Amino acid sequence: MRCPFCAHEDSQVKDSRPSEDGAAIRRRRQCEACGARFTTFERVQLRDLTVVKKDGKREPFDRSKLERAIGHACRKRDIDASKIDRLVSGVQRQMETTGDEVPSVKIGEAVMAGLKSLDHVAYIRFASIYKDFNEPGDFAEIAERVEKEGVAPPGQNKLL
């Protein structure tokens, strides 16, 4: 593994342990040249995914892009980072089992389903971007639907 500090080619693994409920391995490494320590994560990747956008463009699946989108929706919410990471891993695994090409709509729907069971406010935030809300009534409509569908996720107060 190349050192992120000095770009030396070799590093030594100092510690390995399972992470993310066994879905990844966390490795602490030390550069043999400069002695700097850094962490890497190793995850199973079933296949290389291609995301098919609404306009027909194709691009490689980018886990970090999915993490950022979910992170924006969950910003300033009391949601444990491990739950967000499990959601990202779950969506990625779900998409990897569907085939080599996956429509962006399918990814969005999977994220919305996960966020709905995790945090209603994060769900509405994500929906506002994903569904391209243009008017205040769009927010009210989805908030009413969430309120009608039942109880808030554990640890979350009623929405309205």
Image (cartoon, grey):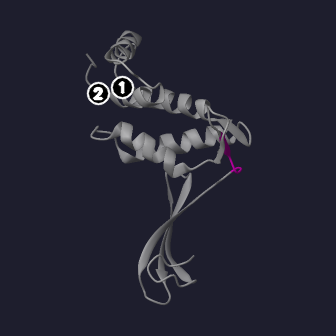
Residue 106: assigned label: none
Q: Residue at x 47, y 29 (%)?
A: 130
Q: Is residue 102 left or right of residue 32?
A: right
- First in sequence, mark 1 or 2: give its number: 1
Q: Quadrant of the N terminus?
A: bottom right
Residue type highlighted by circle 1: His
| Residue at left offset 31%, top offset 17% | 136
Q: CA distance from mark 1 to mark 2?
A: 8 Å
Residue stretch in magenta? 46-51
Residue type at mark 2? Gln
Q: Is residue 2 above or below residue 112?
A: below
x and y, in percent, of residue 119 in the image: 36, 30
The residue located at (58%, 34%) in the rendering is: 107
Q: Residue furthest right?
A: 99
Q: Quadrant of residue 79?
A: top left
Mark number, residue 156: 2
What secondary structure is found at the residue carrying circle 2?
loop
Residue to which mark 1 is pinned? 120
Is residue 98 placed above or below 6 in the rendered structure?
above
Q: Secondary structure at mark 1?
A: helix
In the rendered structure, are the residues bearing label 1 and label 2 in contact, judged by CB atoms less than 8 Å apart?
Answer: yes
Residue 89 point in image, percent of width and height: 54, 45
Which is nearer the eye, 151 or 2? 2
User: Is residue 103 on the magenta stretch?
Assistant: no
Q: 10 Å neighbourhood of mark 2: few (<14), some, or many (≥20)?
A: some
Q: Is residue 149 above or below residue 106?
A: above
Give the x, y percent position of residue 147: 34, 13
Occupied quadrant, residue 52: top right
What's the residue at 29%, 37% (across, down)?
A: 77
